[in-house]
Image (tube, helix red, strand yellow):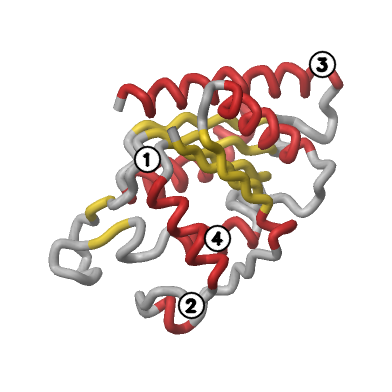
Amino acid sequence: MRAMVVIGHPAPASFNHAVAEAVRRTWLEAGCDVAYHDLTAEGFDPLLTAEEARGRPSEDALVQAHIAELQSCDLMAVIHPNCWGAPPAIMKGWIDRVFAPGAAYTFAKGDDRGDVPQGLLRARAALVLNTGNTPADREQAVFGDPLDRMWREGILRYCGVHHVRRALYGVVATSTVADRAGWLADAKTLALRVRDLAAQA
C-alpha cells in the first residue's frame, strides 16, 4: 500500500514534525511504502504560475513528482498548523499546484463551467492533523473550525477521497509533555484507522 505524508511547517524541531514522523513511522511499521515530504526542507515553491492558473500542466519537476505520488497513493496525510484559519502559505501553495486540474479532478465538459467535479485521486482515505493555540470550544463557537470544512469538503472529497479523518491538537503553546505524548498517541491511532479504511475501500 502506497502512502504519502506531507508536512508544512518551517521549523524542523516543531511538534508538527513530531506528529508527521509518528504517522510516517506508524505506516512504515504497518507495511506501507511511505513517501515523506517536508515542504520547507525540499524548497517547494508555493507560487502558482500564470500557466498553471489557466489549467496547464506544471513545468516544475518537483511539482510534477508530487502530482505523480498524489495520483498513485492509496492513503495520505497532511500535517500543518492553523494559520488564521487556513494552512500556512507553503501548504496552501502545495494544494494549489499539486491538486491540479486534470490530475486531482476534472469536469465532464472538460473545463470548469460550474459543474459538479469528478475526483480523479486513487486514494480513498486521508488523515489531516493540525495544531493550534485556540481552545477547542472557542474554535468551534467563534471560528467554526474552517480547516475541517476546507480539507474535508473543499479539497479531499472534491478530488475523490471519501474517507477523511482529522484532529486539531492544542493549545500547543501551553501544552505539557504529557499533552504532547497523548496527541502523538492519538495521531498513531488515527493513522492506523485511516490505513484500515484505505485497505477496505
Q: How crowded is mark 2: few (under 14 residues within 10 Å), some or many (20 or more)?
A: few
SS at circle 3: helix
Circles 2 and 3, Cβ within 8 Å, touching? The answer is no
Q: Residue at x 39, y 74 (%)?
A: 57
Asked if residue 109 lies left or right of residue 144, the reply is left
Q: Which amino acid does label 3 sit on?
A: Ala
How far apart marks 2 and 1 lie (CA) works out to 24 Å
In the rendered image, the vertical position of residue 105 relative to residue 190, given as above or below: below
Q: Dot 2 corresponds to which residue? A: 59
Most extreme residue toward the left is 109
- Looking at the image, is mark 3 or mark 1 earlier in the sequence? 1
Q: Nearer the viewer, residue 174 or 59?
A: 59
63 vs 69: above or below: below
Tell me where residue 115 sits by quadrant: bottom left
Of residue 173 and residue 181, the one placed in the foreground of this image is 181
Mark carried by residue 123: 1
Q: Mark 4 points at which residue?
A: 94
2 or 1: tag closer to the N-terminus: 2
Q: Which mark is residue 178?
A: 3
Q: Can residue 135 be seen in this view?
A: no
